[in-house]
Image (tube, rainbow, N blue to C red):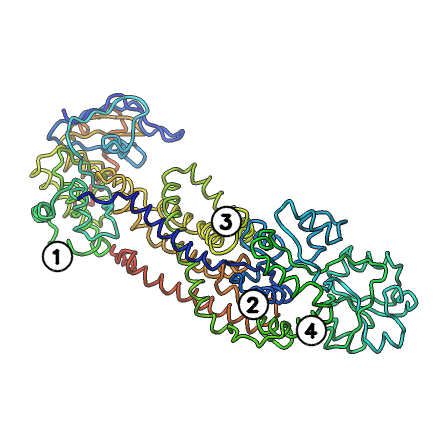
Amino acid sequence: MMIALASVTKAFGGRVALDDVSLTVESGHTHVLLGSTGSGKSTILKLILGLLKPDSGTVRVDAVGRMGYVVQEGALYPHLSVARNVTLPARAAGWSAAAQEARLRTLAELVGLEPALLRVYPHELSGGQRQRASLLRALILDPPVLLLDEPLGALDPIARAELQRHLVRVIAEVRKTVVVVTHDIREAFVFGTTITLLRHGRVVQTGAFADLARRPAEPFVAEFLRAQLPPSDMTREL
Amino acid sequence: MRRPRVTTLFASGLLAVAACGTANAEAPTIRVGSKSFTESYILAEIAAQIIEQTGEARAERRFGLGGTGIVYGALASGDIDVYPEYTGTIAVAILKEPAVTAIDALRERLGPRGLTLGGPIGFDNTYALAVRRDAAARLGVTTISDLRRHPGLTAAFDPGFLDRDDGWPGLRRYYDLRLADVRVMEHALTYAALAGGRVDLIDVFSTDGQLARLDLTLLVDDRRFFPDYRAVLLARRSLAERFPRTWSALERGLAGRIDTATMARLNALADLERRPFGEVAAVFLGRAPDATRSPRSELGQLTGEHLTLVVVSLTIAVLLGLPLGILAARRPRLAQLELAGVGILQTIPALALLAFMIPLFGIGRVPALVALCLYALLPIVRNTLAGISSLDARLVEMTTALGIAGWRRLAWIELPMASITIMAGIKTSAVLTVGTATLAAFIGGGGYGTLIVTGLALNDVRTILMGAVPSAVMALAIHAAFEALDRLVVPRALRAPTAATD
């Protein structure tokens, strides 16, 4: 076990974001937090990162070093070149320029970012390239844990499908403990060995996709999964 | 070998500075002040030339100080040694004892403050009523009391004179006067009205330069209604004690030497004939006028002074304002307090802020720098705070996840990203400071304001423009300089118009 939340409650002002949430993420697994906007899934990532403190309950992370963090639209710094952006954690950690350079080359290939793009600024990148750069930055210190918050959320369908396939390969390759936040059940299906479905800050069900699909804990689970299914006649046409 | 300690270096620096001070002290200096109107400039210039002729000390001119509060404050704090003043002002505004009028009584009351008075210079600068000389002769009026016999006369009075209790309302009651018609008119226009025969009577200041030119007669205040505004030199007692020869030369040269008509003539030389003060004083003293410094030759020096005021005060304001802004961005509650504080500073009229500096720092460049610096703070603090606290929250949050904290977060992320806003604040302050620095002249801080103050005193638009135009040019130049600086400070990617890629 790598990450454990036990009876965590978190409120912002009067609004309860998480209500008695418990979950564990196994080492080396990919765990998907699935839910609609406002279900509390991003709050869980911030608690794991230590950006937020729980009001009650505990958050335990059995990992040394920083965690890699990727958010929607990348959160790259507009005033820094892509190379500067992605090496920020290494600079802060006091790496030599040569070490940064070497790591940069390896990872650029892994995430599929052309070396020429390292010299430009974030606003010159496409959405997909930005997410690849952001992933590169998250991996630069070789962290044991990778946290991805809607990493494909802001992409157009083609870039999204392409990066999704790529991301699955990268995750398999780097063998890290990964937590992915998404509202998209296809992504949950593709990424996750374990899925936790959240609703209004509460855990509705945790399990493999098949468990959720075949043995829904409550009617909402089935409703949520079915809502995103394409109409059957559309699937036939395709 | 041991490295010299910092304290040792500092001490030797101080010694060097002290040595410079001693070198200057070998030629002792008497600092002569003046208010910012023609008569005060002329009297102060006469005093300064007498001091120079006597040779006991150098005369340093700290002219054009704005108003009694400032120039008296400068005398009281020892920033100047002597300036021309009026007995009524001393009694009312300085001692707050309006009943005291005798010179000896005033001198006695000034004693405990370490001050003294010279003998009356010989003229009185107070309100007076003027009529045309021919009309005075025809009507047979020489005194204000005589007006009671002519209730058919008309008058034009300046609004101030018409309102003040020591003006027309009081005068009318006191003398029981009646006039056929009293009009309100701007002071400058009343002369023309009187000369053109449209009115018979106007209010004037008794030493006004226009009096001699227009051939007017002043009516004698026979029952002594108008307060006594006899001109005197107001000085620190130490001046009389340290430089006895100079003090007696000033007494010989000034006491009883200038009557009302002479003063009016000297004022006319400056006001109407546009003769420099130094030349007017030389005429009075019967000397060949020195090659007096023309305003033009001063311009280089004034530019240097003005630029120093702006650059030094702005540098300090940036060094103070940036950390204050950063601190405010970190602590929202402190931000409220800070913004309120610097905001209140900004609401104080610049001239008042300058005046407040005098008890603390005296007159001259230092109080001007402090006031300008305080004035420049608000835009810098506010923009630094706004720039940092308006950054995209997700980008700031990401710094924690990336392990960028403390000074790195500030230097790598926050300041560069907020640089456009921060630079805009500094730019605003800079341009503001160039303009505000012209007010420094009112407390002897030098700069372009010196010309503006002189020009205002002389009602001479040319001299005013000679200060105002370079000041505006400097503001533009500084703005341009900061635009160039933007290229160095603001990261390239933030300057370029951001291309939308999605």
Q: Residues within 10 Å of mark 2 (few under 14, many from 20)?
A: some
Give SS at disc 1: helix
**Residue under label 2:** B53
How far apart in space, not on screen, are marks 3 and 2 (Cα)?
31 Å
How far apart in space, not on screen, are marks 1 and 3 (Cα)?
60 Å
**Residue under label 1:** A116
Q: Residues within 10 Å of mark 4 (few under 14, many from 20)?
A: many
Residue B92: numbered disc: none
Labels 4 and 3 share a subunit: yes
Would residue B150 appear left or right of A150 to someone viewing this image? Answer: right
How far apart in space, not on screen, are marks 1 and 2 (Cα)?
80 Å
In this view, the residue in front, B305 or B310, is: B305
Give percent across and percent down for residue A113.
12, 51
Labels 1 and 3 share a subunit: no
Q: Tell me, yes or no, if residue B92 can be seen here.
A: no
Residue farthest front in this picture? B245
Q: Inspect the image, locate mark 1, and give the three-letter code of the amino acid beneath it.
A: Ala
